[in-house]
């Protein structure tokens, strides 16, 4: 079924919290992730999804949940990538259960760790997320920190690091 942007917005308003709750249920996780992905494709839903506490649920799937398939992790990362494409509310929201924002060192390190273990589609979404975090006005003071964390990650894992700071 093809959804219009207005129907995606209506579904987000009425069902986002329920879809987030379903993420904790193994039986409903795949369908919930697919529905959240569909509504996250409409940029105006980023605030609705963020207010529904989707970021902590998605980061738990990405970073903590070991029984989740690589395909579902890629879907979770793509939802976050869609959300961060719109500047705004996500920059101030909690991204995990501890209350850390996406710009925090712990979240950045976890995303970097995914680059080694994830499928190519998930890696692409993670790189999009990291790019948007680094481009965020909220992260402007943290860009040097993000760059240093990325540099240390690359060195630790013996990966080439092509970016040089002037």
Image: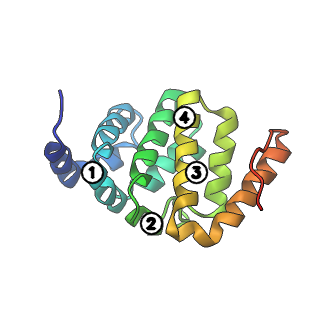
N-terminal of the pair, mark 3 or mark 4, is 4
Find residue 144 and report its image quarter. Answer: bottom right
The residue to which callout 3 is attached is 130
Crowding near the residue tagged with mark 4, few <14, some 14–19, many ≥20 C-alpha atoms within 10 Å: many
The N terminus, quarter of image: top left
N-terminal of the pair, mark 2 or mark 1, is 1
Q: Are marks 2 and 1 in contact (CB under 8 Å)?
A: no
- Foreground mark, 1 or 3, reads 3
N-terminal of the pair, mark 2 or mark 4, is 2
* Residue 93, numbered circle: 2
Q: Nearer the viewer, residue 62 or 88?
A: 88
Crowding near the residue tagged with mark 2, few <14, some 14–19, many ≥20 C-alpha atoms within 10 Å: some
Q: Identify the residue shown where x is 18% and y is 44%.
A: 5
Q: Are marks 3 and 2 in contact (CB under 8 Å)?
A: no
Rounded to the nearest whole Å, what is the CA distance between mark 2 and mark 4?
A: 22 Å
Q: Are marks 1 and 3 in contact (CB under 8 Å)?
A: no
Does residue 38 sit above or below 14 in this rendering?
Answer: above
Specify whether 25 is left or right of 141: left
Rounded to the nearest whole Å, what is the CA distance between mark 3 and mark 2?
A: 16 Å
Label 1: which secondary element = helix
């Amino acid at each position: 079924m093809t959804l219009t942007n207005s129907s995606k917005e209506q579904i987000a308003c009425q069902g986002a919290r329920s879809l987030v709750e379903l993420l904790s249920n193994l039986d409903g996780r795949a369908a919930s992730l697919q529905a959240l992905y569909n509504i996250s494709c409409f940029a105006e839903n980023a605030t609705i999804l963020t207010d529904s506490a989707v970021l902590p649920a998605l980061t738990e799937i990405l970073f903590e949940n070991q029984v989740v398939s690589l395909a579902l992790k890629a879907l979770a990362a793509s939802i976050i990538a869609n959300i961060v494409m719109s500047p705004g509310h996500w920059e101030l929201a909690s991204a995990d259960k501890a209350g850390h924002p996406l710009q925090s060192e712990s979240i950045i390190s976890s995303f970097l760790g995914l680059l080694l273990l994830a499928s190519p589609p998930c890696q692409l979404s993670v790189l999009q997320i990291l790019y948007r975090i680094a481009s965020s006005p909220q992260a402007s003071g943290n860009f040097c920190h993000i760059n240093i964390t990325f540099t240390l990650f690359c060195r630790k894992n013996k990966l080439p690091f092509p970016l040089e700071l002037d």
